[in-house]
Image: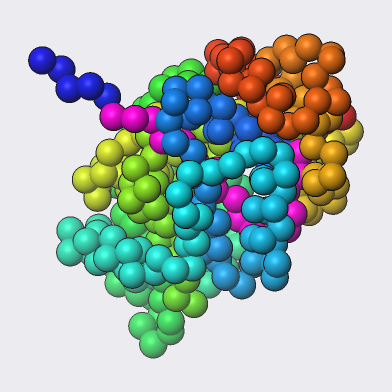
Amino acid sequence: MLAEPGPACGRFAPSPTGPLHFGSLIAALGSFLEARAQHGQWRVRIEDVDVPRTAPGAADAILRTLESYGLLWDGDVWFQSQRTERYQAALEALSRAGRLYPCTCTRRELAGCQRGADGSPLYPGNCRAGPRQPGRPHAFRLQVGDACLTFQDAVQGERHQRLASAVGDFVLRRADGWFTYQLAVVVDDADQGVTEIIRGADLLDSTPRQLYLQRLLGLPTPRYGHLPIAVDARGDKLSKQTHAPPLDDQNPGPALWQALRFLGQCPPDDLLKAPPAEILDWALTHWRLNRVRAIVAHAAK
Ligand code: GLU
Ligand code: ZN
């Protein structure tokens, strides 16, 4: 007999670099609805792995905003800054498997390299045979070899990436000692029992690196779905850098309603001014991930 699938578990994993904006609401709401519509859990994790980039007070502000939007999470909120030992253990496992090498190249030394899928330098392998500058602090890079990853995205369809040509050997721990997002996210998603990862399509290029790490670490692979990205009138992704306005904690209804529209759902007009709990009730009964458009971006109102 086939085992019953375990309960679904989704998550929202904001980086506390500033307040939530309409773009972050899309990811929060999409992940919440996909998990809860399956009667699953929805977890919140604060991705403060890159401590120097976190803004004081931002994590608290994010949690207050989620509460005022009725997006109430299960269990305790996790903070990546408290999980360093788990990341270290994963790094050591990969090191024992012979997959890591120290790299002493600085950002400046790599500035002239060809660019990878996410615009960052495609590492040319300078230190693969040994660090170029042995006395310097070093990062740890993962050897990607000729791995080619394929996955079925629940929104974007089938995707492929050859790691060597798209991202190259990537960093798991930086020379300044901080672990990177790619390693932390994989360890945390597994430790939290996450089965559904619904997030913005700006992370689509990261997914193959995460699948590869899961494979090397013997971790289960969740289901992925990448939502279209909200852009402003100039076509730039809503973000702190593009000065996206913060969500209004006092008046959540209109943004929730707009976010549902953005996700291809059709909330009735009379819900526009309803309290968040009522909007979310409607959304949970009517939620259909397959109504979300593939990657076209649309301006936020
Ligand atoms: N912390 C990441 C961000 O805010 C999201 C990570 C994820 O959902 O995997 O962009
Ligand atoms: Zn190097």
Determine the residue positioned at 57% across, 70% down.
51
On the rendered structure, is 288 left or right of 136? right
- Answer whether residue 260 is visible to the viewer in this image: yes
Q: Magenta residues: mostly which secondary structure? A: loop
* Total labels drawn: 0
Quadrant (top left/top right/bottom left/bottom right) for the N terminus: top left
Determine the residue positioned at 75% across, 19% down.
261
Determine the residue positioned at 22% across, 61% down.
93
On the rendered structure, is 298 left or right of 35? right
In this picture the colour scheme is: rainbow
Q: Nearer the viewer, residue 270 or 147?
A: 270
- Residue 18 lies, in percent from the top left, at 73, 58
- Residue 287 lies, in percent from the top left, at 59, 17
Magenta run includes residue 15? yes
Place residue 223 in its image quadrant.
top left
Q: Nearer the viewer, residue 161 or 281?
A: 281
Determine the residue positioned at 49% across, 38% down.
42
- Residue 263 lies, in percent from the top left, at 67, 22
- Answer whether residue 161 is visible to the viewer in this image: no
Quadrant (top left/top right/bottom left/bottom right) for the C terminus: top right
- Residue 201 lies, in percent from the top left, at 59, 33
Magenta-colored span:
6-22
Magenta run includes residue 4? no
Q: Nearer the viewer, residue 287 or 285?
A: 285
Q: Nearer the viewer, residue 118 or 152?
A: 152
Q: Residue furthest left?
A: 1
